[in-house]
Image (tube, rainbow, N blue to C red):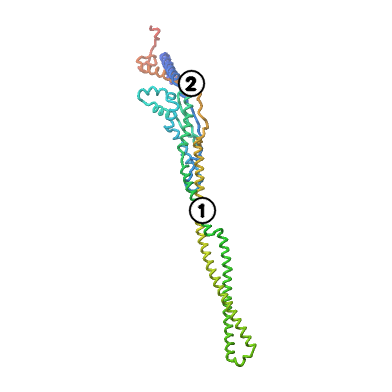
Amino acid sequence: MEKEQERFSLRDLFSILFKYKTRILIVFFGVILAVTSVTFLMAPVYEAKSTLLVKIGREHMYRPEIGSTAEIPMSPSNQEQIINSEVEILRNRELIGKVIQIIGVENLYPAFIKRNKEGINPIDMAILAFEEDLAVETVKRSNVIEVWYRNQDRQMAARAVNLLVELFKEKHIQVYQNHKSSFFEGQVEDYRKKLKGSEDALQQFKQVNRVYSLDDQRRLLLEQRVKMDGSYKEALNNVTELRQRLSTLNEKTRSTSNYISSERDRIITDANLKLLFQELEKERIRTEADLRAQRERSESIKRQLVQMDGEIRRLDLTEKRLLDLRRELAVNEKNYQNYAGKTEDERISDMMNEQKLANISTIQAASVPAKPIRPRKGLNVTLSIVLGAIAGLGSAFFSEHSSQGLSSPEAVERRLKLPVLAAVPKELTA
């Protein structure tokens, strides 16, 4: 029973196809003709592509304005931000406007020139159209940017992409240009004057205070003081000894004088005693002279020690002031060297900017495309065949479904739910 039903269904299908074969063919070839006509009449669109490499260069390095001149590289997350920033610069409306002005609206979008008569600015329309036809994308996990542009003129498509890339490089330099060389030059001049002032102050201080080698001077002073201190102690010891000796001599002289004055008349003729008195007197006088000399020597050495201690204290103060001057000189020299280095870096950077040396490299420049990206004629014709067949069959089944007549005995049985006893072909009835 199922096979019979399937046979009837296939019979119905072929019956419908045979009945509406003319309509099916008309719709089928009509769709093919329409799609093919539109495909071949449609203006071709060409796509030009350029590939850029963004190198993390000098403009992407963090350089502190003061202090160290070392450059700090960006982290990977910052590199991704840099690439995204470059993409936004590429999409800048100002760049697009310059490209359109250089090439000309009449060359990129000739149809917009006619609309100028209607009061619509063709430049604005061209910028909007250019933005729609432009595609800028980044290659994942790389510093590569791909730029596509579509236009109906293959020559204009390639020229527009290459011009956009060149203007982008100039804009990149303009955006990252610092213009700090004049500021650093002023700072270098200021620190040069400060450095010269520090050098002159240090030299004058050395000359006024007779400072040549503080370590040697201090060493010599300390050595002299040690020797002088030994001499001073020796002089004090001599003074003490001479005092004791003088005291002894005075005692002997007094005892001798008393003895002689009491016994003068009795021993005046004793020559030996007289000679002893004279010797004691001479020794006492000589000892007093030596004592005065040693006292004067000790006082002189003491004054020299006090003076030398003052020299040592003055030398310490001189050293402190000298260290301050040297520190000031070192700070000014370091600042001068830092700003001189920054000035040189900025000067080189300005020269590179003047020569348009950017860290953007063109991996592949846009070339004139050989084939359009649309319309895809082969694909469109293939799709038109499929659509034509579907449309033809659809129109046949729709006509059969909407028809009020019964074209086969099976259709009569399905519609009326009655068995068909006989069927007479239309040709016999005629």
Q: Nearer the viewer, residue 171 or 150?
A: 171
Residue pictured at 64% horizontal, 90% vertical? 270
Q: Is residue 77 above or below residue 113?
A: below
Residue in the image at 61% along x and 81% along y = 282
Amino acid identity at mark 2: Gly
Q: Element at badge 1?
A: helix
Q: Considering the image in quadrants, where does the N terminus appear?
A: top left
Which of marks 1 and 2 precedes in the sequence? 1
The C terminus lies in which quarter of the figure?
Answer: top left
Depth check: give the residue in front, 188 or 14: 188
Mark linked to residue 156: none
Question: Is residue 94 shown to the viewer in this render?
Answer: yes
List x then y, in percent, for residue 318. 51, 60
- Residue assigned mark 2: 378
Q: Nearer the viewer, residue 345 or 172?
A: 345
Badge 1: residue crowd in 10 Å (few <14, some 14–19, many ≥20): few
Residue beneath label 1, please?
200
Look at the numbered disc 2 and give the secondary structure of its residue.
helix
